[in-house]
Amino acid sequence: TATVLSFGSFVLLTTVLLALFLTIVNYLEAPQVSSRVKKAAEVLCALSSLLLIGYVGVFLQSIWTVPFWSSYAIPALFVLSSVSLGMALMFLVTSFSSSIEWLNRRMVQLHIGHVTTLLLEAVALAVLVAQSTLNATALRSLDLLFGPDLQLWFVVGALGFGIALPLVAELYSILSKKVLLLPAAQILCLLGGFCLRYCIVSAGVH
């Protein structure tokens, strides 16, 4: 059936298979697989990953019975948050790697990219909150988001750990012109991303 959910299922399967293929050929160093095939698989995996992270937000936004989710800021928020989490995970893995020379030359640009992503994520979240104040039913979800049940998860987790803390850490890295990977900040950024998803879903299904 041609639905958003079925599309997401096929995209998820495609992404998992491509990631598994790339893991095998890169870590087992399969000589029979050419570099062109690897590069094509990398491109396809990147495209399917973008579709996958976009699908989740589109699926929630398509549920018209939940006014809090019926905002175009939801897909943008999920995509930007996923990109931020991906970069945080990359920084975290890199901090425990002994061969990061090829990344060091691009680290400043990556930090700038993460700052840009975090700022856009904050804008998408602000737009979602602003739009929710214009709808009485969505406003109930907003009250729950800032209420006692979710306030700690949202303010400290999603906003603090997921956006504010990594933003400060990245800006410090850029201004100091040093390659600072700060694994603790990246771990908290990942935790904040999960808090954001928990809060958005919980506020919608009140």
Image: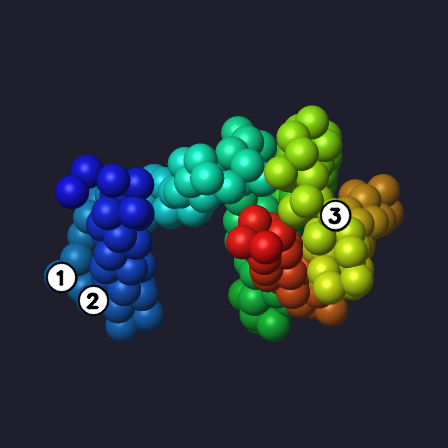
> Where does residue 204 sit, x and y in percent of width and height?
56, 49
| Amino acid type at image mark 1 | Gln
- Quadrant occupied by the N terminus: top left
How far apart marks 2 and 3 lie (CA) works out to: 55 Å
> Where does residue 21 sit, x and y in percent of width and height?
24, 61
The answer to whether residue 175 is visible is: yes
| Amino acid type at image mark 2 | Ala
| Amino acid type at image mark 3 | Asp
Seen at 30% across and 47% down, the residue is 5
Q: Earlier in the sequence, mark 1 or mark 3?
A: 1
> Where does residue 185 sit, x and y in percent of width and height?
74, 63
Q: Which residue is mark 1?
A: 32
Is 17 in front, or is 97?
A: 17
How far apart marks 1 and 2 lie (CA) works out to: 6 Å
Seen at 67% across and 34% down, the residue is 136
Q: Quadrant of residue 43 in the image? A: top left
Seen at 73% across and 64% down, the residue is 149
- Relative vertical location of residue 177 with respect to residue 72 in this rendering, above or below: below
The answer to whether residue 113 is visible is: no
**Disc number for residue 82:** none
> Where does residue 143 sit, x and y in percent of width and height?
74, 48
Q: Which residue is mark 3?
A: 143
- Relative vertical location of residue 125 with respect to residue 194 in this rendering, above or below: above
Q: Which residue is mark 2?
A: 30
